[in-house]
Image (cartoon, rainbow, N blue to C red):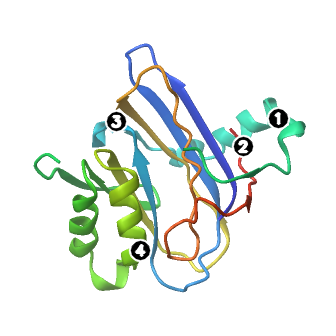
């Protein structure tokens, strides 16, 4: 994953809007997924299909680029009954849940040939770090490099006064090392 673009902004209805995209090359040859922790609640109706305008984050980036941010390095910015929704949206099969237990249930519901592997270490990381958060598991399957369709959604934030930019990445299947210095090619 590279060239990540993240847009977050408050909406007049009190919700926050989050859009996330990147360039993807699946080196494993197996089904893959992005697990997106969401600091609030959301629902399927608040996911926006970006198939027809998948370049909108590129257009915004071209209009508002801050060259002084290039080369930035970072360590990352820092239940109730199970709710699980499953739906297809553009290139993704999405599992939406209000706890990480729902992530396990969603993954188990997928046919084996479409089920990404999620390591125990990564599961523990998400359970411990994002306790009480919602999750969107966005599954895709590709063996070629591609510009991924942006994920775009609204959510009701736990803290309306703080915008959330998901920047904790793990690309090796294990839990992210929050103390490691990593190259960042994100555009906020």
The residue located at (37%, 53%) in the rendering is 136
Ranked by sequence position, the earlier of labels 3 and 1 is 3
Q: Which residue is more in the foreground, 47 or 173?
A: 173
Please provide percent x and percent y for residue 1: 65, 65
Tell which circle, 2 or 3, labels the residue nearer the N-terminal end: 3
Where residue 40 is drawn, which disc sits there? 3
Residue under label 1? 65
Which label lies toward us, 3 or 1?
3
Disc 4 to disc 1, C-alpha distance: 36 Å
Percent of width and height locating residue 126 = 39, 59
Instruction: Kindly report the distance in space between the C-alpha atoms of the residues bearing marks 3 and 1.
Output: 29 Å
Residue mark closest to the camera, 2 vs 3: 3
Label 4 close to label 1 by CB (< 8 Å): no
Is the Cβ of the residue at disc 1 closer than 8 Å to that at disc 2?
Answer: yes
Binning the other alpha carbons within 10 Å of mark 1 as few (below 14), some (14 to 19) or many (20 upward) gives: few
Disc 2 to disc 3, C-alpha distance: 23 Å
Name which of mark 4 and mark 3 comes first in the sequence.
Answer: 3
Looking at the image, residue 13 sits to the left or right of residue 161; the answer is: left
The first of marks 1 and 2 along the sequence is 1
- Residue closest to the eye, 57 or 108: 108
> Residue 77 lies in what quarter of the image?
top right
Q: Secondary structure at mark 2?
A: loop
């Amino acid at each position: 994953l590279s060239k990540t673009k993240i847009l977050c902004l408050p909406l007049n209805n009190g919700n926050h809007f989050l859009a996330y995209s990147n360039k993807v090359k699946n080196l494993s040859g197996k089904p893959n997924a992005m697990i997106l922790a969401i600091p609030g609640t959301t629902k399927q109706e608040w996911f926006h299909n970006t198939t027809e305008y998948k370049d909108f984050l590129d257009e915004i980036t071209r209009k508002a680029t801050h060259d002084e941010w290039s080369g930035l390095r970072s360590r990352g910015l820092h239940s109730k009954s199970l709710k699980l929704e499953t739906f297809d949206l553009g290139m993704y099969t999405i599992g939406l849940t209000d706890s990480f237990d729902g992530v396990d249930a969603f993954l188990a519901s997928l046919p084996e040939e479409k089920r990404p592997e999620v390591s125990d270490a990564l599961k523990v990381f998400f359970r411990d770090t994002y306790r009480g958060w919602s999750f969107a598991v966005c599954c895709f399957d590709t063996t070629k490099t591609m510009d991924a369709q942006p994920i775009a959604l609204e959510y009701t934030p736990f803290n309306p006064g703080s915008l959330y930019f998901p920047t904790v990445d793990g690309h090796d299947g294990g839990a992210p090392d929050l103390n490691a210095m990593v190259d960042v090619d994100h555009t906020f």
